[in-house]
Amino acid sequence: MKHPYKKSLAIILTISSIPGFIIAALVYWMGGSRLESELLHLHQLQIEQGARNMDQQLTNLEVMLSHWASDNQFDYTLAEVDFHKNYDRVRDITQTLLVMEGSNTLTKRVELSLVKPAAVLFDPQYSPISDDTYKRVYENLLKTDKLSYWTQWAFDPDHPGEKDLTLVQHIPGGSSQPFGALLLRLDSDKIASTLKSLMPYNEEESFLIQDSGDLYFSASGASAEAPLVKALREKIGEEPSKRSFFYDWQGVTYTVSYGTFSRIASNWTYVSASPVPSITLPVLFISKLIFLLSIIALVLAGLLSWFASHRIYSPVKRLARHLAGDQHMSYNKEDEFAVIEKRWSLLHEQSDEMRSRLSGQLPHVRESFLRQLIQGYYYAYSEDDLKRRMESFKWEIRDRQFVVFYMQLTGNTNGEGKFKFGDEGLATFAAVNIISELAGKHFEQHNAVNFHNLKAALLILAPHHEPLTGKLQAFSEELTQTFNQVLNMHVTMVVSQPVSWITEIPTAFEGARQLAAFRNILSGNQVIYMDGRTGTPADDEVQYPLVLEKELIQALQSGQEELTCELLESFLTALTMEGAKEIEVQLGMLQLLGSIQHAVMASGIQPSRLFKGVNLYESLSQIREPRLMLEWFREKIVKPYLQEIVRRTDVQTKRAAEQAVDYIRQYYMKDISPESCAEHTGTTLFFLSRAFKQVTGKYFLDYLMEVRMNKAKELLRDTDLLISEVAEQSGFQHSNFHRIFKKMEGMNPTQYKEFSRGKALEADE
């Protein structure tokens, strides 16, 4: 019997150690230079970052001092203050300087010097300057036309070599004739420490110099004429465009980085020079170490591989024999792995199939079980039965407490929302996905239930010893914010008290569902805890607006759509008073619906026919938002009823207008009026006027005048009656017949008679 695996294993183990040797060589010969360049690049970035930080601190100091110089405490009134007597002003100035001194870590001292009318110094304590030498030190600071500038100044005449880097701001701010200055003196040690952040290695040199040469500061304390400093300054002057370069000095290669700070009225240059060997030495050492260890590993791997092959082969041989014992498999003595591969493939396929089925069905089965559990369908099951069932669904329930969340989404039809009316199922599906995702961040075990009508529930399983108050609050806040931002919807959440028994879960859910009806209907997001922390029902009861109900029904019955909608909105506003609960508003709107249906029946219209058999009470009870209730009443109640009234009114309108036209044509020669016509047709004057205009397009009197005029022209044209007789037979009074006829026809009756007969003769010829 051959053992190809045993021989191959020894070769594989030996060969597998060769890549380590190759990698070590590549790291040493090829990667070393790249790592070196990367380290140099990172070193330069570190220097640039330190320089930006230092620039930002100096900029902050300039902005702060400029801001304080404009403060009312440092205006022209300082020249008129008697500091010996005005103790309050001295104390305020001292406190202000102390605040400024503590606002930045680089600050050593903040001083206020006044030279007019008398020399005074706040450092920050008040003291007059009596020594002329000290006085000249501070007077010289004002002998410049710059309002604000940096300087390196010696404030102690006895020690002229001890200079502080100082920011000077003349006061009053913006004045051409300053009488004092705010001085912000920097701590030399802290500036040196800041500059040392630009030089991570001890052998480096880092310094700061003003382009004019008036200001110089070195982190190592080297003078401006030190050989290395002087050489670097000359090199930078030769190649001003390069911001980093390598520089050989006294047999050592330095990597040099420099840049400029834009300060007040000048530019500063920072320079950092680091020896390259100090940066790359760790890389070279590690590369050599890796190379050496790889050689040692190669030798050890070759020796151990032969020994390991014998030990590793033993379980492989046993496994192959065991799998070959299956009656459906044949043992291939030439290759043990052929047996293992075939058997493994079969078992793997069966395992994947079973796992796929289980993973695909388990979430649905768990949700279905949980839905029935919280709704009380398992009330007859014992605690042990429910435990066994939940454990079979992969829940860990031992030593667990249970919390139920009941959630109700609102605000899904606002103008900016992502979901419109009718998208409740889609919105709830998205909400349940968000609930599950966020619950996974806060709780180890949880399951969400989708009720598909903007409502959902969440069951949380947590250890008994775990405090839940903080977690529940954090989860509620995060979930509320996510719903607002992602779905653009509000949410009302009711959180039950933790329960220890599975049989108590339905009671906790039902209590949460009932408490949700007591949410404040005017509020957006609400979190109600069943332990009474928030959201308890108010004691005040909402008064039902009976007067508005009567006015609304009267407007509805009279067909006034606009007034009906206004009263409906006022009615809902009265119900949704401050602190109104959802259940109170729903009951009020249901009562209004009953009153309207009674009015519909009283008007002779069957509600079942008008509303097409829809269960209006059930439909209205599913709406949770006042705005949606208002829209529902307009579309489902007001609009169909008014359409029915209009349909009935159209028939009556046409009949009344036709009767009025017949009345005019029959009695036009008599003294008739709209009132007499309304009495004749049995309608009101308002209804008759509106109906006549709607059907004929003309007003009653205009139409009457038109009929009479047509009759008068006919008599003038076809008869030999006198003008007075024509007026009488056409319904006009003789006294005003001529005036009316001429106004309407442009000629008097006699002229019209002659004109019409002349036309007739011309036609006969």
Image: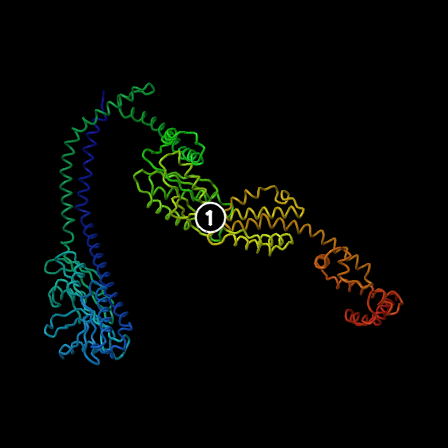
> Residue flagged by tag 1: what amino acid is it?
Thr
Q: Quadrant of residue 83?
A: bottom left
In the rendered view, does 158 fall on the left or right side of 115? left
Please provide percent x and percent y for residue 557. Answer: 64, 52
Residue at image x 14%, y 54%? 278
- Quarter of the figure with the N terminus: top left
Please provide percent x and percent y for residue 111. Answer: 20, 71
434 shown above or below 666: above
In the rendered view, does 55 fall on the left or right side of 286? right
Along the line of sight, which residue is nearer the eye, 754 or 297?
754
Along the line of sight, which residue is nearer the eye, 1 or 160?
160
Name the residue tied to disc 1.
410
In the rendered view, does 569 fall on the left or right side of 230? right
718 shown above or below 29: below
Q: How many marks?
A: 1
Please provide percent x and percent y for residue 6. Answer: 21, 26
- Quarter of the figure with the C terminus: bottom right
Looking at the rendered structure, the secondary structure element under dot 1 is strand
